[in-house]
Amino acid sequence: MKSTGIVRKVDELGRIVLPIELRRTYDLAVKDAIEIYTEDDKIILKKFQRSCIFCGSSENLIDYKDRTVCANCITELKGAAK
Ligand SMILES: [Zn+2]
């Protein structure tokens, strides 16, 4: 983990502002979704990216019954169903 040297204060509503340099570097636009993780004493922010529930791929995704699956896993499932 790399320190950015940036320190920000949390406001009354618990918000912090991500500096524009970080938003540019991580390609974060207004309304983009961020996932929040924790690890020991750390809070980790990660740009939310849709991914396949089986393999984690973010390519060729298809939504089916509120779940996201990639085309490769669908092909494998078809083979397993025979
Ligand atoms: Zn998959």
Image: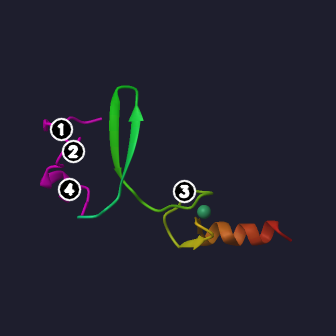
Instruction: Indicate the quadrant containing the C terminus: top left, top right, bottom left or bottom right.
Output: bottom right
Instruction: Indicate the quadrant containing the N terminus: top left, top right, bottom left or bottom right.
Output: top left
Q: Position of residue 47 (x, y in %)?
A: 35, 55
Q: Earlier in the sequence, mark 3 or mark 1?
A: 1
View quadrant of ligand 1: bottom right
- Identify the residue position indicated by label 4 in the image: 23
Give the crowd class for mark 2: few <14, some 14-19, many >=20 residues within 10 Å: few
Residue placed at 35% from the left, 26% from the top?
A: 41
Q: Amino acid at mark 3?
A: Gly
Q: Earlier in the sequence, mark 1 or mark 4?
A: 1
The kind of secondary structure element at disc 1 is: loop
Label number found at residue 56: 3
Residue placed at 47% from the left, 62% from the top?
A: 50
Q: Are marks 2 and 1 in contact (CB under 8 Å)?
A: yes
- Identify the residue position indicated by label 1 in the image: 10
Mark 1–mark 4 Cα distance, whole angstroms, equals 18 Å
Q: Amino acid at mark 1?
A: Val
Q: Are marks 1 and 4 in contact (CB under 8 Å)?
A: no
Q: Amino acid at mark 4?
A: Arg
Magenta extent: 1-29
Q: Outermost residue, right direction?
A: 82
Relative to residue 68, is residue 11 depicted above or below? above
Q: Earlier in the sequence, mark 2 or mark 3?
A: 2
